[in-house]
Image: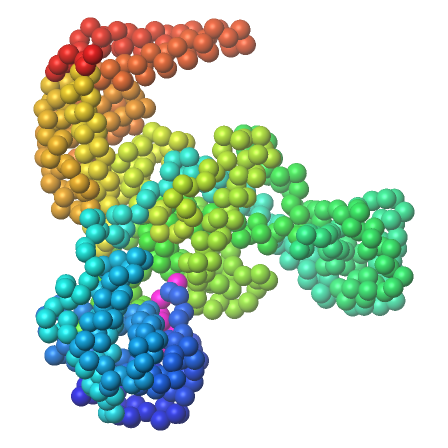
């Protein structure tokens, strides 16, 4: 039997703590459940401020299996998996984290309900055939994939192991897959794997406007919103601390009567589809106690006034000056007292988007950032972010450390990220930047040491996209509305993959209106993020390799159809395209990416913004000056570079763009110098297209 911690008995009674005190890692004094409780909170095992809090609910278990599984769960929480069970399973952890424990017990519950349906009422009644039948039952379900089915069977192995290790075993037999291997009990393996590299990147039409508005919130609107929040807090404190007297009641009546006499709107807020008086705002304006407003409106003689409010609702403007602009136009006419909580919510969401997207951090790493994580460099130089990493952090026994550990090498922060962190430091001046207390409504509570949950942040991001689109329409910028993502909700975990996708594929695209991706890639690769634990450089390599493979495959198909190619690097491009058929299948691992990126004969990058392809050779590249890198700077393509190649499609794009420029130049509303410049640019592009037609070569005649 595996030894229990000294603080707990070998066999628990109803008052025994669920979790041994030596295992508690949560900050503060978390609630500690006892064995008899129906709800076993696992919060004491969680030190990660952004991790989800989970709770085992025993009331959902069948009565006949509840106590047998309760004892096995108590053993799993407080003891390590016996060493004999770990033999042959190097990836298994002796101890599960709280989410792993919760998931395992949830799977036991499903097994218990299935056993009840089979007419069994005790775990001792199970046989090897019972386990085989259950494995087949789960494997046949269409929603169950191989990985999930594997976790289901591993959970039952743990049930057997911890039951056998307890002081009062129920007699669970060994599952057959523990002896014969698990493969024969699982559904067929999928064609491709899952995980981070299988997530879809957020499309440009969604990510571009989303980032633009997030940056505007942080750079241009944050000062107004934070000042307005202080003004709103002063109004609230005035209303809450004003003593109710006869004089203040008279002031209130006079204030409201004057509004009605003038036919003026009454400060109100929209709640559940109806306009209601903003009592706090009116109390502050009239100089009365908050309760006096409520009492005044409840009086029967004021029924007519409530009808008046419904017919004449008005804003609650704050005295805050609006200084933020969009192309010289104020982003809001005035800031409303009732809108401040939502604006603060949008501001913190914008900060999360900026930090998560422009650093490549995982959501949990962003949520764990603390006040002071990005100090001012001394001497002046790059800003660095000091944070914690959680993925893959294990103790000496191979178990996951809930608290994570400080990142070995700090993240590099570009200017927009530093600005977002400074805004967050104003919102949350103590402790975690995303502490729930600092971002809750109402504010002012002490820090909790816990952050906004991932599910809550997902909802906040969806709300922010709607707000950004509404603001774009209000400011007559329909081109900057955030398009719906065809892959579903944006979530929190796709920003990292999307950043790598855009750096690798769209260095001059729509999103680059806000950030120079070439600079961002150089910053990330310049020694910090590249060397740190789990840096984004591997994801960048995978996305760059995928882009290269896609470019070569498209070029191969075009050349076989008779498409012409020209330029000083045309021969090298043809040679590279000949190897495209070897790239069938998806590139999912860093090793596969290195095999492609490490082959100098395959370094072909499409650059539609410059109407060309780069067949990259470091010694011939003109996009680099003093910087040392193994990737081209597609935002610096030079027309005289020896690495350029063009196809017929690029030539067609040159002509189309030239025609658009000629049309602009012909406009009478355009100043002559600008018209001449556009005309010269159009002439230059047409010259490049003509040169392509003169110099291009084709591998075969185009199909008739």
Tell me which secondary structure the magenta stretch mostly adopts.
loop
Residue shown at 32% from the left, 44% from the top: 200
In the image, is residue 604 above or below residue 583?
Answer: above
In the image, is residue 573 above or below residue 456?
Answer: above
Is residue 391 shown to the viewer in this render?
Answer: no
Residue shown at 24% from the left, 74% from the top: 156
Q: Position of residue 43 (x, y in %)?
A: 39, 74
For residue 526: magenta? Answer: no
Q: Position of residue 211 (x, y in %)?
A: 43, 40
In the image, is residue 239 above or below residue 330?
Answer: below
Is 130 positioned to the left or the right of 329 in the image? Answer: left
Q: Quadrant of the C terminus?
A: top left
Considering depth in this image, is 318 or 110 the residue closer to the camera?
A: 110
Is 597 positioned to the left or the right of 260 in the image? Answer: left
Residue shown at 17% from the left, 77% from the top: 128
Q: Quadrant of residue 32?
A: bottom left
Q: Quadrant of residue 328?
A: top right
Q: Which residues are magenta?
A: 43-50
Q: Quadrant of the N terminus?
A: bottom left
Considering depth in this image, is 225 or 499 the residue closer to the camera?
A: 499
Residue shown at 49% from the left, 67% from the top: 447
Going by the picture, which residue comes out furthest to the front?
119
């Amino acid at each position: 039997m595996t030894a229990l911690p000294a603080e707990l008995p070998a066999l628990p009674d109803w008052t025994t703590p669920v979790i041994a005190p030596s295992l508690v890692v949560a900050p503060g004094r978390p609630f500690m459940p006892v064995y008899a409780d129906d709800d076993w909170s696992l919060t004491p095992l969680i030190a990660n401020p952004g991790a989800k809090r989970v709770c085992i609910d025993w009331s959902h278990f069948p009565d006949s299996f509840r106590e047998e599984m309760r004892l096995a769960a108590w053993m799993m929480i407080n003891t390590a998996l016996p060493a004999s069970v770990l033999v042959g399973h190097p990836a298994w952890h002796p101890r599960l984290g709280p989410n792993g424990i919760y998931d395992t017990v949830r799977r036991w519950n499903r097994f218990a309900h299935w056993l009840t349906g089979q007419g069994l009422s005790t775990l001792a009644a199970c046989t090897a055939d019972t386990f085989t039948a259950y494995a087949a039952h789960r494997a046949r379900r269409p929603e169950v994939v191989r990985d999930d089915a594997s976790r289901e069977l591993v959970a039952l192995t743990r049930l057997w192991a911890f039951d056998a290790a307890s002081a009062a075993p129920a007699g669970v037999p060994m599952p057959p897959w523990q002896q014969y291997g698990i493969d024969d009990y699982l559904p067929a393996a999928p064609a491709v794997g899952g995980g981070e590299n299988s997530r879809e990147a957020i499309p440009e039409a969604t990510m571009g406007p989303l980032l633009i508005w997030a940056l505007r919130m942080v750079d241009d609107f944050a000062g107004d919103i934070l000042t307005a929040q202080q003004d709103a807090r002063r109004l609230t404190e005035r209303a809450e601390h004003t003593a109710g007297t006869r004089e203040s009641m008279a002031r209130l009546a006079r204030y409201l009567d004057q509004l009605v006499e003038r036919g003026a709107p009454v400060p109100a807020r929209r709640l559940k589809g109806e306009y209601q008086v903003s009592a706090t705002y009116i109390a502050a304006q009239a100089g009365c106690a908050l309760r006096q407003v409520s009492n005044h409106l409840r009086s029967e003689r004021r029924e007519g006034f409530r009808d008046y409010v419904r017919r004449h609702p008005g804003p609650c403007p704050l005295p805050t000056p609006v200084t933020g602009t969009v192309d010289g136009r104020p982003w809001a006419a005035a800031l409303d007292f009732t809108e401040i909580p939502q604006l603060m919510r949008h501001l913190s969401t914008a900060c999360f988007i900026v930090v998560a997207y422009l650093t490549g951090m995982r959501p949990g790493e962003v949520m764990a950032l603390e006040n002071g994580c990005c100090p001012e460099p001394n001497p002046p130089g790059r800003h660095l972010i000091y944070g914690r990493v959680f993925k893959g952090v294990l103790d000496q026994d191979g178990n996951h450390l809930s608290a994570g550990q400080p990142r070995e090498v700090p993240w590099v922060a570009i200017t927009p990220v530093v600005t977002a962190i400074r805004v967050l430091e104003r919102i949350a001046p103590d402790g975690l930047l995303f502490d729930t207390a600092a971002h809750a409504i109402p504010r002012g509570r002490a820090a909790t040491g816990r952050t906004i949950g991932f599910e809550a942040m997902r909802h906040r991001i969806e709300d922010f996209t709607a707000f950004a689109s509404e603001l774009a329409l209000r400011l007559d910028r329909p081109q900057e509305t955030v398009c719906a993502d065809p892959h579903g909700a944006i979530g929190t975990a796709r920003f990292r993959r999307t950043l790598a996708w855009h750096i690798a594929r769209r260095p001059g695209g729509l999103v680059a209106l806000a950030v120079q991706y070439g600079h961002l890639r150089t910053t990330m690769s310049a020694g910090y993020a590249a060397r740190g634990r789990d840096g984004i450089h591997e994801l960048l390599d995978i996305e760059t390799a995928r882009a290269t493979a896609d470019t070569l495959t498209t070029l191969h198909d075009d050349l076989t159809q008779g498409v012409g190619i020209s330029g000083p690097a045309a021969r090298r491009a043809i040679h590279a395209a000949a190897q495209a058929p070897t790239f069938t299948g998806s590139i999912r691992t860093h090793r596969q990416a290195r095999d492609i990126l490490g082959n100098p004969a395959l370094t072909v990058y499409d650059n539609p913004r410059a109407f060309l392809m780069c067949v990259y050779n470091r010694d011939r590249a003109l996009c680099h000056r003093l910087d040392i890198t193994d990737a081209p700077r597609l935002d610096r393509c030079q027309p005289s570079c020896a690495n350029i190649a063009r196809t017929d499609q690029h030539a067609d794009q040159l002509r189309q763009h030239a025609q658009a420029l000629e049309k602009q130049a012909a406009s009478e509303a355009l100043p002559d110098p600008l018209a001449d410049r556009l005309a010269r640019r159009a002439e230059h592009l047409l010259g490049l297209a003509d040169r392509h037609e003169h110099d291009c070569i084709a591998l075969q005649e185009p199909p008739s």
